[in-house]
Image (spheres, rainbow, N blue to C red):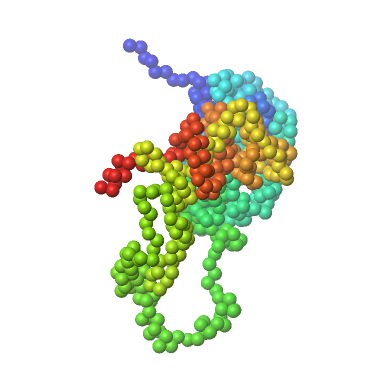
Amino acid sequence: MPDIIQLLSDHIANQIAAGEVIQRPASAVKELMENAIDAGASEIQLVIKDAGKELIQVIDNGKGMSPTDARMSFERHATSKIRNINDLFTIRTMGFRGEALASIAAVAQVELKTRQAANETGTRILIEGSEVKLQEPCVVNPGTNISLKNLFYNVPARRNFLKSANAEFRHILEEFTRIALAYPAIAFRLINNGTEQYHLTSGSLKARVVGLLGNNYEKKIVPAEEKTDLINITGFVGKPDAAARTRGMQYFFINNRFIKNAYLNHAVVKAYEGLIDKESFPFYVLFLEVDPARVDVNVHPTKQEVKFEDDQLIYSYLNAAVKHALARYNIAPSLDFTLSPEIQHLTAVNRPQNEERKEQTQNGYLYNVFTDRNQAHVVERKDSLREWKSLYEIAQNPTLPPMPDRTQPDAAPASWQQPVEVHLQGKIYSDTAPAASTTGNMLLIHGDLLATPVKSGLMVVNIRRAQERIIFERLQEQVTAGKALSQQVLFPASFTLPPQDAILLQELLPDLQKIGFNILPAGDYTFTVAGTPPDMQPGDERNVIDEALDQLKNEAPDAVGNRARVLLANMARRLARNIDSMAQPENQQALIDELFACGQPEYSPSGKKVFFMLRTEHMEEMLG
């Protein structure tokens, strides 16, 4: 048998490596900008054409490279940052793998111009598909100017899998934002298709946050700072009103490297408990400075996932730092145990306790309950059996209204709807809101469930989910027929989005228009809502838009055709609020009739059960 194992050529090996390192244009942007930062640049310019498919150019004023280094930088595993294995675990620079430029050169046409300040001339190198076409001296400013043209030109399958220009540029914008946030002392420019999107001067972190994410954050963020022996935490957290229904405005940096970590995110969200809605996401830009030996950044090819040596301790410090920041600026409630002057002068505070009052206190019920071990939860100690007995005596109280005649289930005495007074130990407890009320042949339970007898037993319907299904199918019919209704807004509302969300919304506008929205771009990532679908409550239009954006951020690549359905489901959930109308019997019957006229009455648009059947034989079995 002949030998069949062969070494791959450098060209194919580089293309395989490119698949791991350069997944899309944004990956190349990240690698090139990180190289510019490691070169000590104080100004970095990023030029993009056709979402990076045609051109990605990064120009910096860093230290540049010698002719030999310029050539060596395109070799695999060539790096200036690692000399031995220990360097790998104490790394603080960004592009240290030695694969980025080699991977990029394998799938793009690359032109590099670079010059060190001490040299009069620089070096120009042209590479296509890992093959050096030209190396010559050139005139260029100190620093490095690198251009990538026709990304994936020799890997058409990979190029075909790229998303739309808007989607790819959004990913580029995300990488640009992360790097610009991490280095506020560096000036950045972003030029997209000949238009300057950003011109960020060097300055403070707050100025960089506002410059990148919008002026509306200027008064919505507060500083967070905590310094310990293990970790230093700095940055900004948003006030509760800065929370949004979309993810994406959460930024963690470990030693100035952007990371994603669900565990640390939970620590921040936990600090906002009780301050924001459960469906909202807080805003934060937090920098964690940790000894590099205590964190492993080599667990993922993109270096966006890390492992900590003391993750539970870091969780506690981070949670405390965010709580402290919110409390310091009177956002979160905090306890103040100091007494005001008015309280200090009260007789109860000034009068000393005498032996008689002390003895009375010690003989009291509360003192005994809270001083006896495991007794604080007991309601009554000596007379508890007597209290329970009195509850059972209520059933024999002749003053209570009689039970209804079981032979006439539709007849409910009017007295059942009246408040029932129960006398217990001299106290009166009034039950003014019965748990269930009967109307016609149906039973309304706790206001949100509807029970109705059917041939096989009892059917219990979740009113809100039933309304969601009905409204969803009604809207779906209108969209399919091209007759979606829209009502003009008397006072059009304007809102500003972060740049990446604004690009997403621009992509969503045709789908939103199909369901009745009329949203107009107003420039500078600002939009005006001039029309909404009928019956939508004022203010809900922003929630629907935020939920749609969040869905689009996290959608699967094949989910584009499903966007209209997701939008309709969000709309239906927002409009399904008229539960109070279910008190009228005619509305209850109409709900049941409309539900079973739907094509899929059993499940809500989000896939939850709308009703369940309690069969007669099952009820008889439960009753023995």
Vertical arrangement, residue 136 with respect to residue 462, above or below = above
Vertical arrangement, residue 3 with respect to residue 65, above or below = above
Vertical arrangement, residue 448 with respect to residue 102, above or below = below
Q: Quadrant of residue 102?
A: top right
Vertical arrangement, residue 473 with respect to residue 588, above or below = above
Q: Is residue 354 left or right of residue 194?
A: left
Q: Is residue 36 left or right of residue 279?
A: right
Q: Position of residue 470 (x, y in %)?
A: 53, 36
Q: Image point 50% across, 32% down: which residue?
A: 598
Residue at the farthest top position: 1
Can residue 473 be seen at all in this image of the molecule?
yes
Q: Position of residue 451 (x, y in %)?
A: 42, 45
Q: Quadrant of residue 442?
A: top left
Q: Image point 46% across, 46% down: which residue?
A: 440
Q: Image point 65% across, 21% down: which residue?
A: 134
Of the pair 511 and 183, the residue shown nearer to us:
511
Q: Is residue 192 left or right of residue 343?
A: right
Of the pair 18 and 170, the residue shown nearer to us:
170
Q: Position of residue 455 (x, y in %)?
A: 37, 37
Q: Quadrant of residue 375?
A: bottom left
